[in-house]
Amino acid sequence: MLTIHVVGDELYDEDRNEFINGFEGDLELEHSLVALSKWESKWHIPYIGNEKLTEEQVLDYIKCMTLNDVDPVVYSHLSMDNVKRIREYIEDSMTATTFVEAEGSSPARNVITSELVYYWMVALQIPFECQHWHLHRLLTLIRVCNVKNQPDKKMSTAATLRQNQALNAARRAKYKSRG
């Protein structure tokens, strides 16, 4: 969860001839499958991997991420720094898990929607309380489950030879041997 402190500008009311204190409040945000589902149900387009989102759509996603009850005015007072922190939070992997891509393979570029993620959760028997996790963490768990459920792949003869050559070269360098 990310908490953003939003401070609005002090405004001058010309009718009353007085200054009005600016808005101040906290936004509690969670980039989760629940937020994604809310946003996609409104906009009817996929959010993940969509590079053509308008400012209105991005702001609406921030609204869908909001966990606490806030005055809607708070969104108009988001600073560039606030938006930058929110983007960094959305892009953060939130996990220590890394994946090594197989040689010669490229990641699949399928369109991912909230319903597809829910399907993966059901198929992999991931509990529904995980829908509240950070979305990247949930997607990493799904990927780990997929990797662990696949049978081990045998390396090709050429790949085995390359790996053995690299290991032998490393050992020769380590022990200062010529073979």
Image (spheres, rainbow, N blue to C red):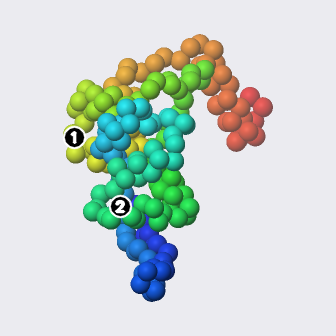
To which residue does mark 2 refer? 72
Q: At 73% across and 39% down in the image, what residue appears? A: 173
Position of 56 with respect to 146 (left or right) is: right
To which residue does mark 1 refer? 128
Q: At 63% across and 14% down in the image, what residue appears? A: 158
Position of 86 with respect to 125 (left or right) is: right
Hey, which residue is sitting farthest front in the picture? 15
Position of 8 with respect to 169 (left or right) is: left
Nearest the eye: 134 or 96: 134
Image coordinates of residue 35 in percent, x first then y, are 33, 46
- Please tell me how crowded label 2 is: few (under 14), some (14-19), or many (20+) other residues with Cα within 10 Å: few
Nearest the eye: 91 or 21: 21
Image coordinates of residue 84 in percent, x first then y, are 54, 58
Q: Quadrant of the N terminus?
A: bottom left
The residue type indicated by label 1 comes to: Phe
Q: At 37% across and 71% down in the image, what residue appears? A: 25
